Amino acid sequence: MESTELMYNLFPKEEARTEKPPRYMSKFRTSVVQEKKSHLDAMRTMGPAKVEVPSPEKYLMKHSKPQLPENVPKYSRVTGGTLRKPDVPKKTDNPVMGIHTNKDFVKTNVLENTTAVARKPPPIYADTKRGDKQLLEKSGLVPKYIKKKDYGETPEYLQQRKEETRRTQEQYDDYVKQRMKQGAMKQLSDQERQTLLQGLKKNWEELHHQYQGLSVVIDTTPKKNRKERLESAMKQLENDINLIERYKTIYIANN
């Protein structure tokens, strides 16, 4: 008496297709690549890119150093170019004199400190007897979520799911009503349902009695086949009984 027709199979299901968003491409990609390539080209050698090759006659003597040409610009790792910052002044250089200012640093510092707003310490809490402190905001004790505009409202996806369930149930009810008007389906009454349920349980008890009477040692093929047939029939009856007990409203086809 199990019906293979389900309400979810009566309507076509739409396949949910998720479109993958396009990959993010920065508008500065080309400039970054060119800048990186230029830096790599500038640092390909351990020294200047073009240096005059010394002749074999002018070999280096002991305790001598190679002399680089003066017109070759030096590369700076800080600025990323060929310009260098000015050198540190030597101890023999005289500092720049004659620079004066009318600013009173003492009064300015006093004024800034007296008019400054005191910094408020962040709220904390102690979670151990030794006084270990933690930030209160990250503890979950601050009621910051109840101040949101959508606090306490049903999420939109739950509302959509509820509306789809209601619409599907209405369509199924309309379909059942139309089929019942056409005479193709009829609803089982409570008495018929109970009678059918008692009959199924009685059949299961008979099969179970036969199953209990099987031999303990199953050493032949007919015994094995009979045991498998009884188990399959009992399993089918158990599924039918669970189906009828689960649903109180059951429709069957007249044909």
Image: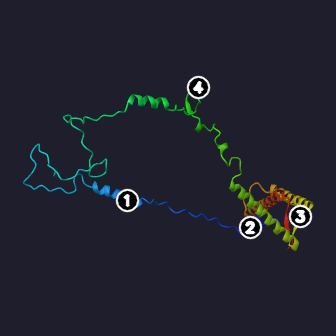
Q: In this figure, which residue is indicated by the disc labeled 3?
A: 188
Q: Quadrant of residue 224?
A: bottom right
Q: Which residue corresponds to the image point at 72% horizontal and 56% vertical from the top-left?
A: 159
Looking at the image, residue 227 sits to the left or right of residue 191; the answer is left
Q: Tag 4, which secondary structure? A: loop
Q: In this figure, which residue is indicated by the disc labeled 1?
A: 33
**Marks 2/4: CA–CA distance:** 62 Å
159 vs 4: above or below: above
Of the image marks 2 and 1, the number of the one nearer the N terminus: 2
In front: label 4 or label 3: 4
Q: Quadrant of the C terminus?
A: bottom right
Of the image marks 3 and 2, the number of the one nearer the N terminus: 2
Q: In this figure, which residue is indicated by the disc labeled 4?
A: 129
Q: Position of residue 175 (x, y in %)?
A: 81, 69
In this view of the protein, which residue sits in the foreground, 14 or 37? 37
**Marks 2/1: CA–CA distance:** 56 Å
**Marks 4/3: CA–CA distance:** 69 Å
Amino acid residing under circle 3: Leu
In front: label 1 or label 4: 1
Q: Position of residue 207 (x, y in %)?
A: 83, 59
Q: Position of residue 173 (x, y in %)?
A: 82, 65
**Marks 1/3: CA–CA distance:** 76 Å
Q: Tag 2, which secondary structure? A: helix
